[in-house]
Image (cartoon, helix red, strand yellow):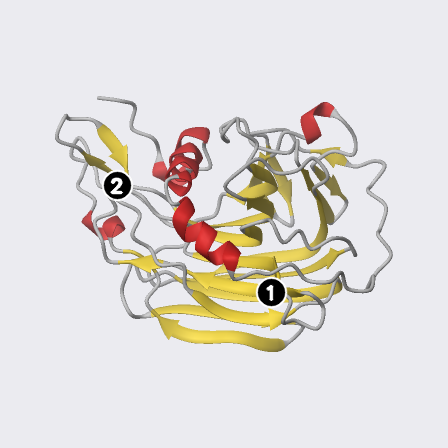
Amino acid sequence: MPVIYDTALDCTPAIIADLAAELSRHSGAMAALAERLTTPSEPEPALVTPAAPTGGKVVAMDETVTVWGQKWVGHTSNNGGATPRGVVIDGSSVYFRATAREHAKWDPSNGRLVRAELCGTVRAGKGQTLTAEFDFTIPSGPTYPYLVWRSLYQIHQADTYYVDAAGNLVAHRGTPPLAIELAADASSPTGEVLLVRGETSTGDGKALTAPLRVLAKVPFARGAHHLKVDYIDDHGGPDGLIRVALDGVSVVDKRIATGYAYVDQAPPINGVAQRSGSYPKIGWYAGRDTTVPADLVLEMTVSNLSISIK
């Protein structure tokens, strides 16, 4: 039987590789979403691009760092060794820069994914409220309508496993149950919108069955903002919570089904109950169904981030 991974600390290449592979199998659903995003005219620059930090701590792939009073794991290739780097800690701020060269070592080699992010190590259990609050600045620049998704904050549910008919240990399947994303949208006065997606499923997790629920879509202007996100994972049940406020204004506040039921259905392995939990990821994760053009540059600076679990 293959190695049993510790799902309490599953910011690991194997876990994320499972998710990336499963997403690639569902390009049809992603393409349908992309078709709804028509090419907008470029908005007027809302902010002068801030310079990337010249010093600070460069975060390496799989490196555990402490910032904002929490431990995080780097998911970045640091721009293939070029400068500026992908994730840089500068005091109480973190600079994220994702380019066509920026990815994690487990991502597909076809260049369709880019990422420069930090993966949180905290875990919220079923029914607990995971709250994140932070300031972020996104400089002016292209809206990249060819991207199918462009996440800046996510909550993942740590994967559990089942034993298939051949006796192999296989990870259950689930996309991030919460994602805050940017998307090009010609109907927005700024040419861009902030999306809130909340995924859920009562399936057994052996196939990716989560719907691509868009819970909110609001016009977004580049510049400095404040975001607060409250999330309760109910493992596919109806008593979850997704509450998002941008600059103090409510974007979505729903008591709805959240997370995945397969977490509660996961059998013990070697007599030990499988552990799971919800955890945050912050920074850029973006992609499409084919290779990302070389001119892609996504930048963001995040500061004053606080994470709490109640």
**Dot 1 lies on which element?**
strand
Residue placed farthest to the left in the image? Answer: 165
Which sits in the foreground, 19 or 255?
Answer: 19
Residue at 58 percent of width and 49 percent of height: 147
Residue at 24 percent of width and 50 percent of height: 262
Q: Kindly identify which residue carries mark 1.
A: 194
In the rendered view, does 184 fall on the left or right side of 257? right
Q: Kindly identify which residue carries mark 2.
A: 274
Of the residues under marks 2 and 1, which one precedes in the sequence?
Answer: 1
Which numbered disc, 2 or 1, marks the residue closer to the eye? 1
Residue at 46 percent of width and 30 percent of height: 13
Q: Residue 201, position in %: x, y?
A: 29, 57
Please, what is the three-letter code of the amino acid marked with disc 2?
Gln
Q: Residue 241, position in %: x, y?
A: 40, 69
Residue at 73 percent of width and 56 percent of height: 138
Q: Residue 124, position in %: x, y?
A: 41, 54
Location of the C terminus by quadrant is: bottom left
> Visible in this render: residue 244?
no
Q: Work out how far the residue at label 2 is from the one at label 1, CA to CA, in angstroms.
A: 35 Å
| Mark 2 surroundings within 10 Å by alpha-carbon count, few (fewer than 14), some (14 through 19), many (20 or more) | many
Q: Are marks 2 and 1 in contact (CB under 8 Å)?
A: no
**Dot 2 lies on which element?**
loop
Please, what is the three-letter code of the amino acid marked with disc 1?
Leu
Q: Which of the labelled discs sits on residue 242, or is there none?
A: none
